[in-house]
Image: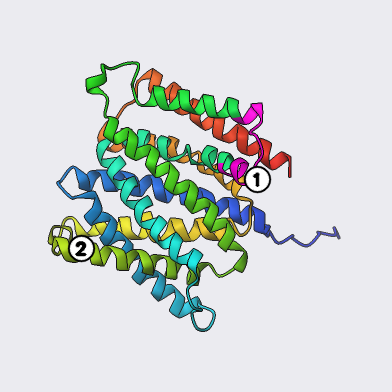
Amino acid sequence: MLDIPPAKSISLSPNSLGLVAILLTVLCWAVAANVAFDLFTTGIHPLELAGVSATIATFGLAILYSFWGRGQIKPMNLKQFALGLVLVFLVAADYVAIQQLPVAVAIVLLFTSPILVVLWTAVATRRTPSRFVLLALILSILGVVLVSKILESSQGQVNWFGIGIGLTTAVFFATYIILSEQLAGTGESISILLRIYAVASLFWLAYQFTQGLPLDLLTGDRFPKVLLVGIVGNLLPYLLFFWSIQRVRAERAAIVATLEPCVAAILAWLWFGQTLTLLQIAGGISIVVAVTAIQLRQFSHQ
């Protein structure tokens, strides 16, 4: 009789699971960005959507914590409070950028954030950025110029407000990455993110109190999309992102996350017929190449 070796069980390493989580994060953000754009075309205000989606995410995290939480929630510290405020401005700026610009352009501008992280690290450590870092910065700036259609349009046709908001989003996301990596070592994804979103929700509730209830978001045809943005655009991706950087370096996570502009661009083309010019595509590629190259170099030097 033939000796048949026992089947080996397939198990993924923590590193592989982290990369899978990043891929799911990319897909979630890309889908939610296009659904948010669809809501904005119906007259929904970005700040209203940001507030309601944050509240939905907070309730969702509270439910998850009731099942998988580890004991009582510990007191909030200053970094978690700061991260909650950063999240407020990150989501708000992101939604305004998506309203003002094509979805793919808004996301490409957002993903210049890893360059900012590297520059901040150089400033914090008082080290002069290397030529390679400066070259990547120049390449990303060139990409922003091309993506923004500055060279293709007259100055009056350029959406300077949208571009400015898009780049501001990158600053907030860079800050979010830095603070998240500092908090990720505790291993408490759900409880930490619940506290972060609780801060964000309280901020939005205070803001919404001055504006009135956003009843337009609760109508029958809009609420399912709002619920999807809250879950797929906030709860799941930020939980997956926070969970993943506990298992892989933020540099490697950022490399995989650069797939999001490509996924978002394809979805925007399929759903809304949004197309990019050749120069915009070239600019997006320049940014992705710059971010990927600098992250690979950082990772290889560790």
The image shows residue 295, relative to residue 220, as above or below, that is: above
Residue 143 placement (x, y as % from top left): 45, 25
> What amino acid is labelled 2 in the image?
Gln
Position of residue 34 in the picture relative to residue 42 (left or right): right
| Quarter location, residue 134 | top right
Instruction: Say whether residue 39 is visible.
Output: yes
Label 2 neighbour load within 10 Å: few <14, some 14-19, many 20+: some
The magenta segment is 120-133
- Report which residue position mark 2 lands on: 208
Residue 11 placement (x, y as % from top left): 68, 60
- Report which residue position mark 1 lands on: 125
What numbered label is drawn on residue 84?
A: none
Q: Residue at x 36, y 38 (%)?
A: 166
Q: Is the image coloured rainbow, by chain, by secondary structure, or in one colour?
A: rainbow
Residue 92 placement (x, y as % from top left): 31, 51
> What amino acid is labelled 1 in the image?
Thr
Distance between the Cα atoms at labels 2 and 1?
A: 40 Å
Position of residue 23 in the picture relative to residue 233 (left or right): right
